[in-house]
Image (spheres, rainbow, N blue to C red):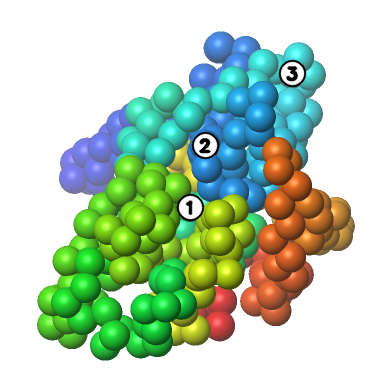
Amino acid sequence: MHRTLKAAVAALACSLAAAPALAQTIDKIKQTGAITVGNRDASIPFSYYDDQQKPIGYAMDICAQIVDAVKKELKMPNLEVKYQLVTSANRIPLLANGTVDMECGSTTNNLDREKQVSFTNTHFVTANRWSAKKSYNIKSLADLKGKTIVSTAGTTNIKQITEINAAQNLGMNIVSANGHPEAFQMVETGRAVAFVMDDILLYSLAAQSRTPGDYEISSVALSVEPYGIMVRKDDPAFKKIADNATSALYKSGAINGIYDKWFLKPIPPKGLNLNVPMSASLKKVLAAPTDSGEPAAYQ
């Protein structure tokens, strides 16, 4: 009996301790009258700056739907929306410490990251590949043996190519760049033979380069990469709002217009058209929304 009572008291103490964390984002929003959105500066077309230094993009449009849902749920129509620039390296720490309330970019949802953060429903499915100059004739991983490879710091991509390098004893010299444009520039200038990154970002960077025809994206896919909006871990009340908003957006078909706007039409500031039709794997995800970080869920 004594042991049972003791266990009950301990359980109550745990639940009370956990209670503030369950609604921490919502409480913070109510107290401050603002929601802070983490944005990227050069993850075209997901999250980047236009010529007025305003954050725009496919992920930003989806996050705007979440913000509208928060306003409605909390009955705060005048909720202030703040933006905070984040990078691949600091996006998780800034989310975890409360600097941003959600991160809207090109962030891969995987099981390792799910130990630190949560993701709302997947909004894009890409693959980890490499971009290289056609003149190098890089067709396989074996062709990269002993070469200098670049990827972006703090990404799943650099982690994966490092693991592959070690496992297959390729002897590649892997260097990290602070951002995607810097990494691509290293390939442009010959400081690296290939840039390992999500294919959609590679297509975007090649299209913006001075000589787009000089580059090719590998047919070899190193992994499947589902993108999601990051929210704080162990905060189901806020995640539920975000999940419901994204699910409604996808199932209503309204997401199709947003997708076409960013992937099939000229986008600001330079009128770049990526011309990337929606993949079968993304269509599947939008028809049956999932927040899974398991690659098999996207096959």
Task: Report how far apart the C-alphas of labels 3 and 1 lie in the structure.
Answer: 28 Å
Task: Judge from the rendering whether residue 13 lies leftward or rightward of residue 6; answer left or right.
Answer: right
Q: Amino acid at mark 3?
A: Met
Image spot of residue 261 (x, y percent)? 80, 52
User: On the image, numbered disc 1 is attached to which residue?
Assistant: 107
When asked about the image quadrant of residue 131, the answer is bottom left
User: On the image, numbered disc 3 is attached to which residue?
Assistant: 76
2 and 1 marks in contact (CB < 8 Å): no
- Report the residue at 40% width, 52% height from top: 185
Q: Nearer the viewer, residue 227 or 49?
A: 49
- Report the residue at 70% width, 67% height from top: 276
Q: Earlier in the sequence, mark 3 or mark 2?
A: 2
- Report the residue at 44% width, 48% height from top: 181
User: On the image, numbered disc 2 is attached to which residue?
Assistant: 41
Q: Amino acid at mark 2?
A: Asp
Q: Residues within 10 Å of mark 3 (few under 14, many from 20)?
A: some
3 and 2 marks in contact (CB < 8 Å): no
Q: Earlier in the sequence, mark 3 or mark 1?
A: 3
Answer whether residue 277 is visible to the viewer in this image: yes
* Image quarter of the C terminus: bottom right
Image spot of residue 6 (x, y percent)? 22, 39
